[in-house]
Image (spheres, rainbow, N blue to C red):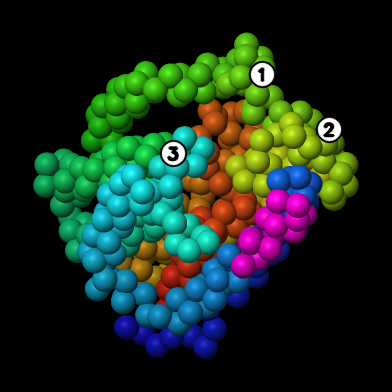
Amino acid sequence: MPATRSTPDMIMIVVTLLLLSVGIIMVYSASADLGQYKMDDSFFFVKRQMLFAGVGIAAMFFIMNINYMTWRVWSKILLIICFFLLIAVLIPGVGLVRGGARSWIGVGAFSIQPSEFMKLAMIVFLAKYLSEHQKKITSLKKGLLPTLSLVMVAFGMIMLQPDLGTGAVMVGTSIVMLFVAGARISHFVGMGLIGLIGLAGLIISAPYRIKRITSFLDPWSDPLGSGFQIIQSLYALGPGGLLGLGLGQSRQKFGYLPEPQTDFIFAIISEELGFIGAVFVLILFSLLLWRGIRIALGAPDLFGSFLAIGIIGMVAIQVMINIGVVTGLMPVTGITLPFLSYGGSSLTLMLASIGVILNISRYARY
């Protein structure tokens, strides 16, 4: 292992903290009135977000100083723990139901979402497996199929909650890692067709998913029902114009756009800060992706490369899905926008994941 640098990738640190700062400001702007109405405290949501951000930043800087090879040693144990948590969350009395999904486990006054941590555990495990068995990945029976089978077992357990959005991010990230490792496109095409059939089955099996698809294609066919969120999101995007209505001046957050501080915070950003504010956020995410890819390419070993590409791929996929939903390009999936949306487990996980990449950057040559 080559000697570490005196400092990690400073551009990635600055970009991450900028995104986090924008997120805290926008969470307050989007949730102040909601917090006052529901909790009699306009600072309710932002105080919790700042607490989660503090924990996440501490985790990021702590993990940044842990040799990333440590995660290789603990990869199987981490995956097993996350599988047990996915089982535990399904047990009545242990798992908490919110928004129709049993996805949380209560810990005191707070709660964690095991499916979020499964995403990172799966990335770590796949990075170890692919670094040791990269040649096998070109074989459907010996490499690709067994690996995807494990991913689909985890996906199936997440779907029991159900949480299609988080499961889709995990599967998408795994596919990116397998593709980078050298899996054959022909195998992906064949298994992709099978996956589409399975996805169609999942959609058909749940009426609310069918409504989400139909509302995505024509939200105005049910403007007060399944198409409500998309329409209200578009109503937020339109008036923003070039410069926006001004910070704190959103109209859609006043009971029109449900939970504006979470999945649809990008709509509030666009409404209040306009096209320029939205582009600024996209530029920050692009810089984060660029630095992540550079670190992955410069990592001194395959494990570091796969680990970095998996983490930055997870962030990129989540950003694309969230913004796709907000702009009406994708059906509503319930995915948060990394570093910006309100949420404890998601924010803590993302910051901890960046800490892993930052440690890899201390060994990378680029």
Q: Residue at x 85, y 50 (%)?
A: 247
- Quarter of the figure with residue 197: top left
Residue 179 placement (x, y as % from top left): 32, 47
Residue 16 placement (x, y as % from top left): 61, 65
| Residue 218 forms part of the magenta stretch | no
Depth order, front residue of 125/264: 264
Categorize mark 3 by other alpha carbons within 10 Å: few (<14), some (14-19), many (20+): some
Q: Which mark is residue 224?
A: 1
Does dot 3 land on a helix, a strand or a loop? strand
| Residue 44 forms part of the magenta stretch | yes
Residue 23 placement (x, y as % from top left): 68, 57
Q: Which mark is residue 239?
A: 2
Categorize mark 1 by other alpha carbons within 10 Å: few (<14), some (14-19), many (20+): few
Residue stretch in magenta: 39-51
Amino acid type assigned to the residue bearing label 2 in the image: Pro
Q: Are marks 3 and 2 in contact (CB under 8 Å)?
A: no
How many numbered discs?
Answer: 3
Q: Which mark is residue 101?
A: 3
Quarter of the picture holding the N terminus: bottom left
Amino acid type assigned to the residue bearing label 1 in the image: Leu
Residue 110 in the image: above or below residue 257:
below
- 269 vs 104, left or right, is right
Magenta stretch secondary structure, dominant = helix
Q: Residue at x 36, y 84 (%)?
A: 2
Among the two numbered marks 2 and 1 on one chain, the one whose residue lies closer to the N terminus: 1
Among the two numbered marks 1 and 3 on one chain, the one whose residue lies closer to the N terminus: 3
